Image: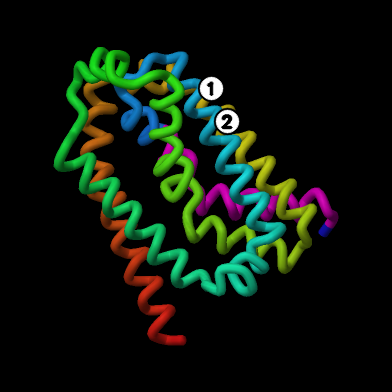
Amino acid sequence: MNYLTLILLNAFTMIAILNPFGNVPLFIGLTEGMKKTTRKKLFTTIVITGFSIMSLFSIVGMFLMNDFFKVDMSEVRIAGGIILVIVALKNLLFPKKMNNKIQLEEDLTEEEEIKQGIIPLAFPMLVGPGSLASVLLVRQESGIISAVLSCFIVFLIIHIMFLGADLIEKILGELVLFVLSRVMQLFIMAVGIKTIISGITMVISG
């Protein structure tokens, strides 16, 4: 197997875990009400942030976990799961109104909207414990350069999909995206709970 093929296979593995084909429509629904220019900047920021997190984690992840913070992946899973559950609860109990665009423009600046969107959209919704674990595995099996290049390919694909957000929104429609964003909160909460249970199980099993 040549080096390029190995990088592409690693990238496909990460794509399966990051699931951009499910996340992109979800992110479009969750950012309903934002101005299109603000949303494009947010999506670009999410891609850059996600790529930075995974690339840096592939380089210094083991050192940070084992030597600096002295935590393991089970504790990262629990923390990420708690964040997902809290975010899902907030969005379910205090949903955005359909006319929230006016409210957002009046209450928050564009920079503030982007800052609020990075967490949890970039982490832990797009890049979560599973993604971090996968990039560490790629680093161990293929090396740092292969891991970083695989991350680059993955987030390039995600960025291209985000560029087509307006087309996806037109195809699905505002109402469908709004309903999708509400329904997906249940699945986000379920993923959060599953992640917490997985982390606790890892801790108990040692």
The residue identified by callout 2 is 159
Q: Residue at x 85, y 55 (%)?
A: 2
Query: SS for tag 2?
Result: helix
Instruction: Give the left or right position of residue 157, taking residue 199 as reference.
Output: right
Amino acid at dot 1: Leu
**Residue placed farthest to the left in the image?**
93
Q: Residues within 10 Å of mark 2 (few under 14, many from 20)?
A: many
x then y, percent, for residue 175: 22, 22
Q: Are marks 1 and 2 in contact (CB under 8 Å)?
A: yes
Q: Residue at x 81, y 49 (%)?
A: 4
Q: Residue at x 67, y 55 (%)?
A: 10
Q: Nearer the viewer, residue 119 or 99?
A: 119
Instruction: Give the left or right position of residue 116, taking residue 174 as reference.
Output: right
Compared with 194, 4 (above or below) is above
x then y, percent, for residue 6: 76, 55
x then y, percent, for residue 27: 39, 33
Amino acid at dot 2: His
x then y, percent, for residue 126: 47, 45
Q: Is residue 100 visible?
A: yes
Disc 1 from disc 2: Cα separation? 6 Å
Q: Main secondary structure of the magenta part?
A: helix
In which quadrant is the N terminus drawn? bottom right
Query: For the magenta stretch, what is the residue range?
Result: 2-24
Q: How many marks?
A: 2
Q: Residues within 10 Å of mark 1 (few under 14, many from 20)?
A: some
For residue 163, which numbered disc appears in the image? 1
Magenta stretch containing residue 152, yes or no?
no
Residue 160: quarter of image: top right
Compared with 118, 74 (above or below) is below
Query: SS for tag 1?
Result: helix
Q: Residue at x 22, y 43 (%)?
A: 90
